[in-house]
Image (spheres, rainbow, N blue to C red):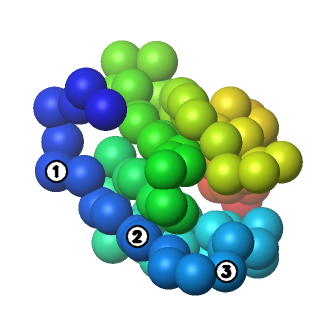
Amino acid sequence: MSTLYLVDEYEFFNRKPSKKQIDSCLKNAMEQGSKAVAIIWGENQIDLDYNDSQRMWYGTGHIKNISGWDLAIEWNKKQENKTLNLWNS
């Protein structure tokens, strides 16, 4: 992972992490203000990086059928919805 930010790493041992567990790790990292997150399970890894200039998350890698790209799209949509809610308030 190439990033300018300190990377928060979450490592799972033995069983594959579920989508819910991965989302929980990401939510925890986002609440702490993280801009780079790595989720590791054995040889598999998902990396998420935040790009400040584009205000978007970018993801790479995968753990079984959970891809970093899909997670980034999901978190970008959540972020966009928060922004829209602030504008409508």
The residue tagged with tag 1: helix, strand or loop? loop
Q: What x and y, as percent, mark residue 64?
A: 77, 51
Q: Looking at the picture, how far across and down is residue 87, in whole percent? A: 68, 45
Residue 87 visible to the viewer: no
Q: Is residue 82 something that shows in the picture?
A: yes
Q: Is residue 76 above or below residue 43?
A: above
Q: Residue at x 50, y 76 (%)?
A: 12
* Numbered disc total: 3
**Which amino acid type is marked by label 1?**
Leu
Q: Is residue 54 above or below residue 25?
A: above
Q: Quadrant of the C terminus?
A: bottom right
Q: Which residue is mark 1?
A: 6
Identity of the residue drawn at 65% across and 42% down? 62
Q: CA distance from mark 3 to mark 2?
A: 14 Å
Q: Type of residue at label 3?
A: Arg
Tell me the residue that label 2 is attached to. Answer: 10
Quadrant hosting residue 19? bottom right
**Which of the two discs, 2 and 1, sits closer to the camera?**
2
> In front: mark 1 or mark 3?
3
- Residue at x-position 67% and y-position 73%: 17
The label nearer to you, 3 versus 2, is 3
Front-most of residues 30 and 60: 60
Q: Which residue is mark 3?
A: 15
Q: Amino acid at mark 2?
A: Tyr
Quadrant (top left/top right/bottom left/bottom right) for the N terminus: top left
Q: Is there CB contact under 8 Å for labels 1 and 3? A: no
User: Tags 3 and 2 in contact by the CB under 8 Å rule?
Assistant: no
> What's the distance in space between the residues labelled 2 and 1, CA to CA?
13 Å
Dot 2 falls on a residue whose secondary structure is strand
